[in-house]
Amino acid sequence: MMTQNVKQAIRDQLNTNEWRGQPLPANFEELVSAYNQQFRLIRAAAKSETPCDWGLDLSEGPESLLPHLAVAKGLSRVARLRAMWDLQNKKPDEARDDLLATLALARNVSRDGVLISAIVQIAMENILISTVAENFYQFPPETLKQLEDGFESAPARGTVAQAVTTGERWFYTWFVQKVQDARKQHPRDEAAAMADIRAIFRKVLTSGDEKNPSDPTDKMLEAAGGTSEGLLTLLGELPPVYDRATAILALPRKEYEAQIGPFEAEIKASRNPFITELFPSLIKCRQRELVIQAKLAMLRAAVKYKLGGDTGFNSVIDPLGDGPFLRQRFVFAGVDRGFQLKSAYGGQIFPEVMIFVEKAGTPFVVDGKHAGEAAPKPDGK
């Protein structure tokens, strides 16, 4: 399934061009067909009833290798391109199968319970939802219904709360183990033990960039009084905070927002740098999770609207609001191009919207902070 099996020249050509808003060239089939083997396997895996197990060794904590994540996310981008080609060539069923198989892959990516895996799942879901939205007018009604059903019946989503319960605790255990290992290696030499600990922490906390200005290593060691025993004391304060975070992060939006403010204030006020450094990222991840929940519902609402008009649309409730999404027509460069759905959620400052394209034309961004703006040129990544 590795994308490295595809020639770099093909990957570069696919990733460094803007393909939307124009007829795809004849050689595009050759480019996306280079991934036929990967998508054959993805489709087969999506139908498998065997539980997904990536066989990861999380005992390495922050140093654990997760090579499948970049590959999986890259394949979601390819799924988008393959769908564009299939739709242009009147093969909506092929586009549907690739998108739903990749959705199953996205959901299974998060099975390891690691926070970054849950974030990659969200990124992949966002790519797939956006693919349907920007090609909405090219899907026949029956295929849209099949996509809606497929999204509903896909494997369960991995959550941020689950990641805190499993993966994040592995990292805590890893920090404790490294301190204990250093003490065992230098039983009568605290200075040597702390030198080892400093080197290990700095490598992990800066991702190998020792000149990183945000390196919190010295702050952590200072808060520990410069001793390994002090570090173990600070680390020992983490489990109760993980328990509280898990409970809060699993709450529905309203209850979550009622409790996250006081919890975040406590985190910021903590004198324990492990708490102030490690926990804010969990809150940002929960915001992303809430957004994708809204977008998944937006996709369902858009299909219901296409198939059943206002009655169908109003049957879908904004999971982050108190009623249906706000719907309005969307005009780009003076031309009515489709409709826009807006969620009640504003957790990322800008309104959460999704635009469903009903007419071909100049490509534009269909979601996120720049929704409704002309599509930027790809950066090649």
Image: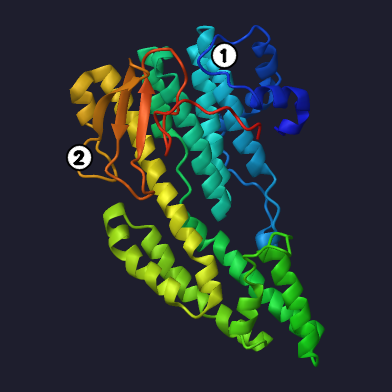
Q: Percent position (x, y) of residue 277?
A: 54, 68
Q: Could you say which disc has been placed on residue 123 in the image?
A: none
Element assignment for label 2: loop
Residue 360 versus residue 183: which sits nearer the camera? 360
Q: Is residue 301 above or below residue 165?
A: above
Residue 267 versus residue 98: which sits nearer the camera? 267
- Where does the C terminus fall, quadrant-wise? top right
Taking the view exactly as shown, the residue that stands out farthest to the bottom is 188
State the residue position of label 2. Answer: 323
Q: Which image quadrant for residue 248?
A: bottom left
Residue occupying the point 39% across, 33% down = 152
Confirm whether residue 229 shows in the render.
yes
Q: Report the colour scheme.
A: rainbow
Q: Which image quadrant for residue 192?
A: bottom right
State the residue position of label 1. Answer: 85
Residue occupying the point 29% across, 46% down = 320
Crowding at mark 2 (Cα within 10 Å: few <14, some 14-19, many 20+) = some
Mark 2 or mark 1: name the one nearer the start of the chain: 1
Residue 316 versus residue 365: which sits nearer the camera? 365
Residue occupying the point 28% across, 59% down = 255
Left or right of 16: which side holds 302? left
Q: Percent position (x, y) of residue 299?
A: 36, 30
Confirm whether residue 113 shows in the render.
no
Left or right of 309: which side holds 193? right
